Amino acid sequence: MSHFPGFAMNSFLPTEQRLAITCRLYPAFPREPAVLVRLIKHIYKRVHDDANAMLKPWGINHPEYNILMMMYGTEGFTLNPSQLADAAGEKSANITRLTNELCDKALIERTADAEDRRKVTLTLTAKGVALIEKFLPDVCALLEQETASLQSREMVQLERLLKKFLTQLDNQTDQG
Amino acid sequence: MSHFPGFAMNSFLPTEQRLAITCRLYPAFPREPAVLVRLIKHIYKRVHDDANAMLKPWGINHPEYNILMMMYGTEGFTLNPSQLADAAGEKSANITRLTNELCDKALIERTADAEDRRKVTLTLTAKGVALIEKFLPDVCALLEQETASLQSREMVQLERLLKKFLTQLDNQTDQG
DNA sequence: AATCGATAGTACATAAATGTACTAAATGAG
DNA sequence: CTCATTTAGTACATTTATGTACTATCGATT
């Protein structure tokens, strides 16, 4: 496949064909939702792998990157674990482990919160900020490369649809 | 939040705000691609969790479900491990483990391929097919519920855009 | 102030996923 | 045919992620 430049391979085809057969065997099966969920999964895995590969030379992995960036995107570079869990989309037990690793690497610091002694304050160190600004050019290049096939209009459209999807997932708990 | 029926909460807001700040600090940062990647991650995790919760009473988890369904969607309910890896989007080492579990549960069967003795043939058992047809109503309900906010036109649009995205990821290896 | 319930975080055990190295068999070049 | 290469699959060690139970603290109520 990749021997023919310009030929767009399609890693999703085997999945899609099997969903089609499923619909024939079991007509109530909702093809479109199933396709969307599978596409999301395939894309997520691919993006995750790419990010890990790109970040490896910098000594961090994708989840650690996400945490660093969420701190970088916060005034004062400071956040506590539960806010991090929300922002980075990780379970709280995972945050403990990941932030431990980042502390070991001296990229962030853990201090006690003065106001509420249950809370912990995590802060990017100077070393952490410096690392982020060193790897950001690579990150930007990867992100742009990954979305190169989408026009800016299409990205906006995609964002809107994905948000609509996510909102429904968020509200699901309320209803059923 | 969930005390107010009809109020659409937005679990993505904390992430999005931090990406906005990142763009201010580092103007080269491509907001739109970054937002898309994060949305995909949030949605994937949510869908994965929901599926696991729904499938638990049936004694399987989401990756096992994916494997069963890929076999169900194949003529003869038969597939070998590498085809399964492609279709289900799992690494091959993971396929070995997952299919072992399904064999232990007697939902699939592993036999040697007569033609090529390196290959292994995996087949759904009658028990496996029966289980699938028992849990499919729940699966259909969940899929429909998850996508209830999207009109059919929007789903088609979303599918098109996600495929375009994935195709670019597939072709990335060719280009560097 | 004493108590009860909720919240923040972590420790620890377990589950899930991956990388790597290996075996066996097929393919292909000489 | 024979040897080297590629392919299919798995075993094993390691990494990553999660569930659960627990500690400490806060806040509200009495």
Image (cartoon, coloured by chain):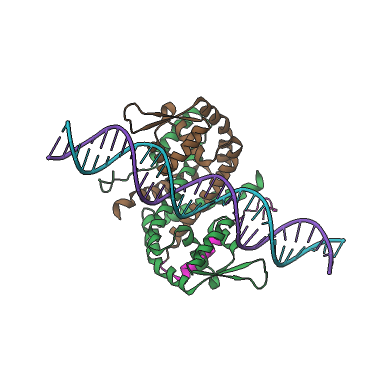
Chain colours: A green, B brown, C purple, D cyan
Seen from the viewer's position, the closer of residues A98 and A84 is A98
Q: Quadrant of the N terminus of chain A?
A: top left
Magenta stretch contains residue A43 = no
User: Which residue: 62% across, 71% down?
Assistant: A112
In the picture, residue D10 is in which quadrant? top left
Magenta stretch contains residue B22 = yes
* Residue A110: % across, % down: 57, 69
Give the answer, above or below, for where A67 lies relative to A154.
Answer: below
Give the answer, above or below, for where B69 lies relative to B126.
Answer: below
Seen from the viewer's position, the closer of residues B172 and D24 is D24
Seen from the viewer's position, the closer of residues C27 and B175 is C27
* Residue B123: % across, % down: 44, 29
In the picture, residue C29 is in which quadrant? top left
* Residue A108: % across, % down: 51, 69
**Viewed as shown, does residue B5 lie left or right of A159?**
right
Q: Quadrant of the C terminus of chain A?
A: top right
Give the answer, above or below, for where B54 lies relative to A131.
Answer: above
* Residue A55: % across, % down: 40, 60
User: Which residue: 40% across, 66% down?
Assistant: A135
Magenta segment, which residues? B1-28
- Give the number of callouts: 0
Question: Does residue B95 appear in this view?
Answer: yes
Question: Does residue B149 appear in this view?
Answer: no
In this view, the residue farthest toward the top is B126
**Viewed as shown, does residue A110 lie left or right of B70?**
right
